[in-house]
Image: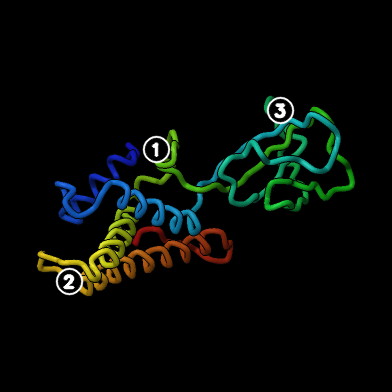
Amino acid sequence: MAKTLAQFLTAIRTDLDDAGSATWSDTELTRGVRRALFDFSRIKPAEVIGTITLAADGREISLATLTGLVDVQRVWTDYTASDPDHPPEWVKFELWDDKTTLFINEDTEPQSGDVVRIFYTKWQTIKDLDSETATTVPTEDEELIILGACGYAAQIKARKAIAQINPADTTPAQWAEWSKARLSEFYDVLDDLAAHLRAAHDPRVQVDWEI
């Protein structure tokens, strides 16, 4: 079952040996989760499909209903759910106005009532983070988010510990080094993931995911 924000925070505190919340506040750890999720989403955004029914004729279509949109991959129109064409009626398109407007670049202008089926990517979400209602991060990638969040949390600790009386054995420099190691591992895994995803979309490359 996909983790909620609270479950992510619990896992992060376990890895940081901070079950009693003596070192990090929930706000600080949540900031780490948000940063790790952002990095992850840039490499592996959620892949979703949406439809828009046109209220008027025209080539310019608002994408305001596609919340969290990162990029549009393909557009199919006119789409009929009860009897979809095969192969799909893919159309040429452009994105304008900070990716809020879809421009259909075809000879035939879309008509009122046409259904536009849009294959797009969006930012990954975690339930209860920034009021999100569901977690879209794949279960197999949750540990990666935890790793990155731990690194960012240690980075916060290193900055806060500078010029402060520190009764603990760990110095700001040690926190910074620990953070650097965790984030280096996090970025290395992201790089590997990006390489696999690029290969997966290249028909010339046979990808073995059993690594």
Residue at 10 percent across and 68 percent down: it is 169
Pinpoint residue 193: horizontal percent, then vertical percent: 43, 62
Q: Secondary structure at mark 2?
A: loop
- Looking at the rendered structure, the kind of residue marked 3 is Asp
Q: Nearer the viewer, mark 2 or mark 3?
A: 2
Can you tell which mark lies on residue 83? 3
Residue nearest the observer in this picture, 76 or 131? 131
The amino acid on which the numbered mark 1 sits, given as a three-letter code, is: Lys
x, y percent for residue 13: 21, 50
Label 2, residues with CA under 10 Å away: few <14, some 14-19, many ≥20? some
Position of the N terminus by quadrant:
top left
Point out the residue furthest to the right here.
107
**Kind of residue sitting beneath label 2:** Thr
Image spot of residue 73 (x, y percent):
64, 51
Residue placed under numbered mark 2 in the picture = 171
Name of the residue lying farthest toward the top = 82
Q: Which residue is mark 1?
A: 127
Residue drawn at x 57%, y 66% is 204
Image side of residue 92 versus residue 25, left or right = right
Estimate the spatial distance between the alpha carbons at disc 2 and disc 1, rounded to whole Å. Answer: 34 Å
The reply to whether callout 2 and callout 1 are in contact (CB within 8 Å) is no
